[in-house]
Amino acid sequence: MKILVINAGSSSLKYQLLDMDDESVIAKGNCDRIGIGGHIKHTTFDGKKIDEDADFPTHTEAFEKLVEVLTTGDAAVISSMDEISAVGHRVVQGAELFNKTTLATDDVIQKIDDLSELAPVHNHPHALALRACRKVISESTPQVVVFDTAFHQTMPEKAFMYGFPYECYEKYHVRKYGFHGTSHRFVSQALADAMGKDIKDLKIVSCHLGNGSSITAVEHGKSIDTSMGFTPLDGVLMGTRCGAVDASAVTYLEKKLGLDPNAMSDYMNKKSGLLGVSGVSNDHRDVLEAAQAGNERAALADSMLQYEVKKYIGSYAAAMNGLDAVLFTGGIGENSDDFRAGVCHDMEYLGIKFDDNANKGVRGKLTKISAPDSKVEVWIVPTNEELLIARDTKALVEAMK
Ligand code: ADP
């Protein structure tokens, strides 16, 4: 069975075509610059590449191009779109309406669009892509939506509520939703498999650290708390996001900097975090390089992030009344040995005995990095959100038969 996975943004359409018989990637790429020009990058499993400008006034033309490169020309990998059994879409915000992977009917697509107020950058483009996909690819091909928030819908009220007046939740749906749920679900299950344990017997802290970062407490396979909140701005310092701050500092800075709410939102989402503190870059590699060359603010940004991650691990161990494993994933978590070591050193009181040798130099590979006699296991677990979306999509269409 072949499944097409789509991750659509306002100006891009990332895709992967997977063969679910062996879960291999047949082709992948990105239709970029939608609405402002158009460009496609496409790579096939056997190394054929397309890298060219195109004309993408809307997502519809991007889908038409995708169909063209998949089915015709040198880099074609299928003879017709009929070979594709279903399309799985990543959707950022499902709020309380969606707690699991769902078939994208007209009504569901409309609800995703209606949630745009809660996720302005993401949900409307998702709805545009879903409608465009339906227009271009046969209506008889099922489309499935997998929500970043769905995994966190198991959080108890005491974890997801904010201390605002209760009506803010009732009237405006202001609460913690959490994000990266697809990744946290994938890696926590992969970790349980690697440990040879049933996930229902485990208390895991999952650290997804990339450009956007979030930490999740996964107790017996369920998310019971997570660091991102109402939006992905909450939690730890990120590439360009400030993470959790005192809300009064926000209103104070709005006045001091003369920013309206939209400009303040941009300031917190795009100019802060590693970039804002270091003054060097939003990219962790650049920050580390600058720190090693003696840049103190870069070193400070890195140590702030390490410290925040360490505190989340401790607090989630307290929330779960125990801890069996910590996992690192995402670009920073999978690749930066120094970062992992910085977080896990001096955590013996929690039962973490880190293995520096096992950790050193490991990048993007499923690896245990705690000592054999460590009470709490520590692992690197590469994430693969596209694969989980494809697996969910396959399971849903098979259940429909
Ligand atoms: P996104 O959240 O956009 O999916 P990724 O998960 O790809 O991002 O993570 C990107 C981050 O991972 C960047 O900050 C990048 O610098 C960082 N990263 C990748 N490789 C390394 C490395 N070897 N050392 C430190 N950071 C790294």
Image (cartoon, grey):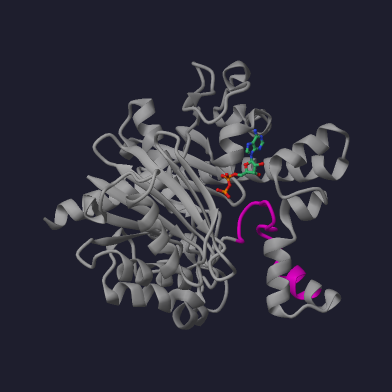
Image quarter (top left, top right, bottom left or bottom right) of the N terminus: top left
Q: Quadrant of residue 137?
A: bottom left
As rendered, which of 391 and 324 lies closer to the eye? 391
Residue at image coords 85%, 75%:
256
Specify the farthest residue to the front: 73
Q: Is residue 185 visible?
A: no
Residue 258 seen in render: yes
Q: Position of residue 195 (x, y in %)?
A: 38, 26
State the image coordinates of residue 209 (x, y, percent, origin top left).
Answer: 58, 44
Q: Is residue 260 above or below residue 227?
A: below
15 displayed left or right of 332: left
* Image x and y of residue 359, in percent: 59, 22
Q: Magenta region, mostly helix, strand or loop?
A: loop
**Magenta range:** 233-252
Instruction: Give the side of residue 332 with respect to residue 97, left or right.
Output: right
Which residue appears at 70% of the width and 42% of the height?
A: 284
Q: Depth check: give the residue in front, 337 or 285.
A: 285
At which x and y percent is residue 276? 78, 55
Residue at position x 57%, y 18% from top? Answer: 358
Q: Nearer the viewer, residue 28 or 231?
A: 28
**Residue 95 among those drawn in magenta:** no
Tell whether position 241 is magenta. yes
Which picture quadrant has residue 187? top left
115, 317: nearer the viewer: 115
The C terminus: image quadrant: bottom left
